[in-house]
Amino acid sequence: MEGGRPPAWPGSRAPGGVCMRSEDSPTVWPARADGTLIAVDRLHKTYVSREGTEVEALADVGFHIASGEFVSLVGPSGCGKSTLLRILGGLIPPTSGSVLFRGEPVVHHKKDIGIVFQNAVLLPWRTVLQNIMLPVIVRHLDRAVHQRKAMDLLAMTGLDGFVHKYPNELSGGMQQRVSIARALVYDPSILLMDEPFGALDAMTREHMNVELLRIWQESRKTVLFITHSIPEAVFLSDRVLAMSARPGRIVREVRIDLPRPRELDVMVTKEFGDHLREIRSFFEVRGRFGD
Amino acid sequence: MGTSAKAGTPRARRAPWSAILQREAVLVPLIFVVAVGAWEAVTRGLGVPDYILPGPSLIARALVNGLLAGTLLYHLWQTLAEILLGFLLGSSLGLVFGGLIAEFALVRKGLYPYIVAFQAMPKIAIAPLLIMWLGYGIFSKVVIAALVAFFPLLVNVIAGLDSIDQDKLDLMNSFDASRWETFKMVKVPHGLPYVFAGLDVAIVFSILGAIVGEFVGSQRGLGNRLLELSFAMDIPGVFSILIVLSVLGVGFHLMVVAVWRRVVFWMEPQP
């Protein structure tokens, strides 16, 4: 269906004239300064639990994401992945440290960030189209322009026939696609995705992964994808960041150089298996890998 | 899965009786007919005096007589007006105060303890006071009905607005939504099922309030008529009033549920 379309994954394009593909850069830590979209530096988050004890959720987290990259963050349950995502999205403040978006504090850049939550979080009283238009209305953007954009996104996510349906008439996979379209409608530079397919069955999940890569390649966004599935992370990403159990910190970075565009077949290749083993071995040494 | 169910011999085609009985439209009237028949049979068979427990036929006659004579309607209009005005007044105040308490921490802190204390008191107990202050006319009964309708709404509006999930707030927050936009576009629709559950309770409470108010002091209304008839030992008449009151209650409940279904179309009402 995309026959004849030139390969459009971010590596092939060069925003600001900077090539983002990384064969030329060494195992990057820290990432180079040019083309950096998000820079996280010495981030700490401590919160007070209901019992009054202090819980350290994140300890000294630091990484960079380059424009156009697909980066996954894997880690055991409760390691603070979601907390990190909420800080990156400007929803909660960090205890200390900084999150810079193009060199500025991230809270000033919410309109450049699209969040896809663990649950689709659709409003059941709004139709699919009305749900996708929600950010447009809240941000007082041009409705006519974005309505056309919403229709394009619905076509792109294969939901053309469901424009005027209500969320409870859709399957879980379709609901999550609507929420992705909603996050893309105002054209943010980066998508933050918090285990978006965690609630789906394995078959739907694989299908959604392929869909996501296609959407990513068409929309040319930067993506930070949180998951606790290592195969999912390897399949999707340019780079996988591994996070330790609480307090969460980034303990390993693995560059995934599997060719793109990727289809599910790639999961049976030796290279894929090597990457899996490399990441998995780390968690095994460290002890149990949650859930 | 499911193989064991298929393994058995295919079920013989059942007589359709049980299926017919399962239908609400059949089952409910059937129980009515059986119960009323048994009631009539017992009162006649055992010769229960009419002033203790009249049979259904006597009650029906009293009902028809009341309707034909116009006395029933005369009192019904009064009570109906008290119920509806009280319900409107009480539930709108409950909506407003519930919204204020749920949304503003300061209001909640300052007002909520008083409201809890007031709620713990049986409102009916101040009915004599209200009659004394506001007189025997319609107004005192409207206020009593409003008072009892107020709390279910208040409590449910607060519960509904408080029950909003963090996900939805995060979503609106990620769009930089203002507090008002979040309230109007997410919290209010989310709270609607609670509001309707509150209205459903409030309308029944309003009936209670109006009747009790009439008991305490009134010149007209179904409660007033009920007392009159029971003093006169007209027990079939008393029953006829009770029937009118329960028909009122069921009617109002069905109306609330009908509107509920229409407005909260994405969710089945849970009575």
Image (spheres, rainbow, N blue to C red):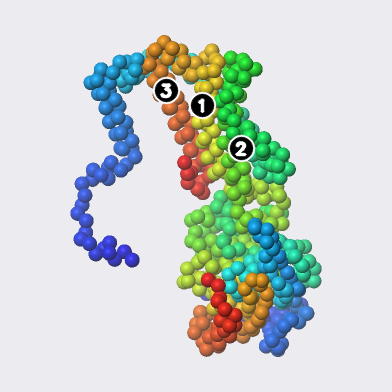
Task: Give the vertical position of A268 relative to B21 (above or below).
Answer: below
- Rendering coords of residue B115 (x, y %): 65, 35
Q: Which mark is residue B242?
A: 3
- Give the secondary structure at mark 2: helix
Q: Contact (CB < 8 A) between labels 3 and 2?
A: no
- Give the secondary structure at mark 3: helix
- What residue sits 60% from the left and 80% below the top? A286
- Image quadrant assignment for residue B84: top right
Q: Is residue A36 left or right of residue B122?
A: right
Q: Is residue B16 left or right of residue B262?
A: left
- Image quadrant assignment for residue A70: bottom right
Q: Chain of mark 2?
A: B
- What residue sits 61% from the left and 37% below the top? B154
**Distance in Å between CA atoms under marks 2 and 1:** 18 Å
- The amino acid type of the residue labelled 3 equals Leu
For mark 2, what is the residue?
Answer: B154
